[in-house]
Amino acid sequence: MDPAVGDFDTGDVLIEDDLVVAVGPDLSERASGHDVLDATGCIVVPGFVDTHRHMWEGILRGSVPRATLDGYFDRVLFGLGPRLSPAHVGLSEALSAHAALDAGITTVQDTSDANDDPARTDAIVAALQRSGLRAVFAYGLPRPFVERRGAAFPDDVRRVRHELLADDAALVTMALATTHGGADDERHNAALAAELDVRTAHHVRPAILPSRMQAIGALRPNTTFVHGNGLSSDELHLVADTGGSLSIAPFIEIAMELGQPMVLEALAVPGLNTCLSVDVEVTGPTDMFTQMRLAYLAARSAGHDLDARTVLAMATSNGADALGLERVTGSLTPGKQADLVVLRADLPSVRPVHDPYGTVVLQMDRASVDAVVVAGVVHKRGGRMVEDRSADYEEAERVLHGLRDAPPG
């Protein structure tokens, strides 16, 4: 995914410590003494980048398969969500990170609308830091909190930035997931993002417009705008003009009846960075193959001749750009962090390979993920996760059964 490096029919990627140091057709002489991941019959790509996922819901995975947006709000944000303890949300984060890595997603922006209690926040951040996933923790507020107290962030955000996530070169960094609210609250949040020197993410749709944020003085540059279904061309141009990106979650947008994914509209705007995301695991799958396929179909069904390389860029390099990580990840470039995925191209459902881009986007799924590396650390090898989290999954089953059996309240 780096034109300056190029593609190789047969090639090697040399990793030293946490960095890619070389990519080429034959680096075997330089591999002496290195651990070798045999990728014969495979395609090696950068790790997928998920630019918007509510990871605190991992423990509730699949719990509302037929939800509309209103049903999701009622069942999850106002129903089950407030009943999760700090330990529960920490477990959720661990499970969501594990599922992401298993599917070849090496970077996630955790759009964490669950921070109404410092104990919850601490559990979330600690779980991310233990996971080995590259993550942007986008501190956000729960919907019930916003309805009671408004959308302005509490002072605890400063503690999180200065004490927990001060290192912008760490595997886990910080952003703010700002929420639609009163003008004073939104200006407060924008000023706080500037003070803390962090990026922002914001859900938008025709009732929540980037132009309104600009008019009230709350529009931050380089914001990751989420969904955007139904936004006008003028609104999308404003996003592009301010260095923002559009994070499309095709599966959830279709499943929850948010509207047609804005792939075609976004691609028509010069300079608009279009990327992909999983969104909520309570209703949808946790892999990027599903999102790539649906993005491709959304554009093709609207008459746009979208090519597979563009779609793979949405899932890799575009996502890294959107999160401000373009110098860190998103392509197999010497000097960048060693975040990569080895995909099996020798499976009956995949071979023969005529076009590797088309193969990754249209023929593969999570069963093809053979190995996953983040910052030089191998998390999956030979199709199996290195870390055994079976005890966490057993605990998640107990928690979920308890939530089902307990009376509402």
Image (cartoon, grey):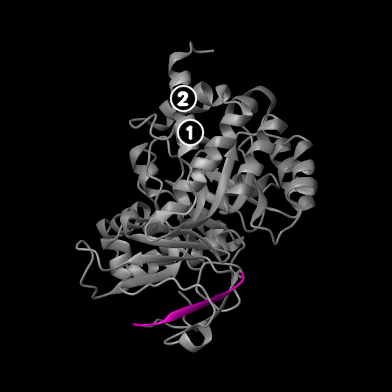
Q: Nearer the viewer, residue 14 or 277?
A: 14
**Label 2 SS:** helix
Coordinates of residue 334 in the picture (x, y in percent): 56, 79
184 shown above or below 303: above
State the count of labels. 2
Left or right of 248: which side holds 215?
right
Whether 231 is among the magenta residues is no
If you read the primary sequence from the N terminus, does the residue marked by circle 2 or circle 1 appear first?
1
In the image, what residue occupies the spot 38% across and 83% down?
Answer: 8
Label 1 is placed on what type of residue? Ile
Q: From which residue to which does the magenta span run?
A: 9-17
**Figure check: 365 above or below 177:** below
Residue that label 1 marks: 59
Q: Position of residue 256 (x, y in %)?
A: 37, 36
Q: Quadrant of the C terminus?
A: top right
85 or 27, nearer to the observer: 27
Q: CA distance from mark 2 to mark 1?
A: 10 Å
In the rendering, at what x and y percent does residue 329 appear? 56, 67
List the residue tagged with mark 2. Answer: 398
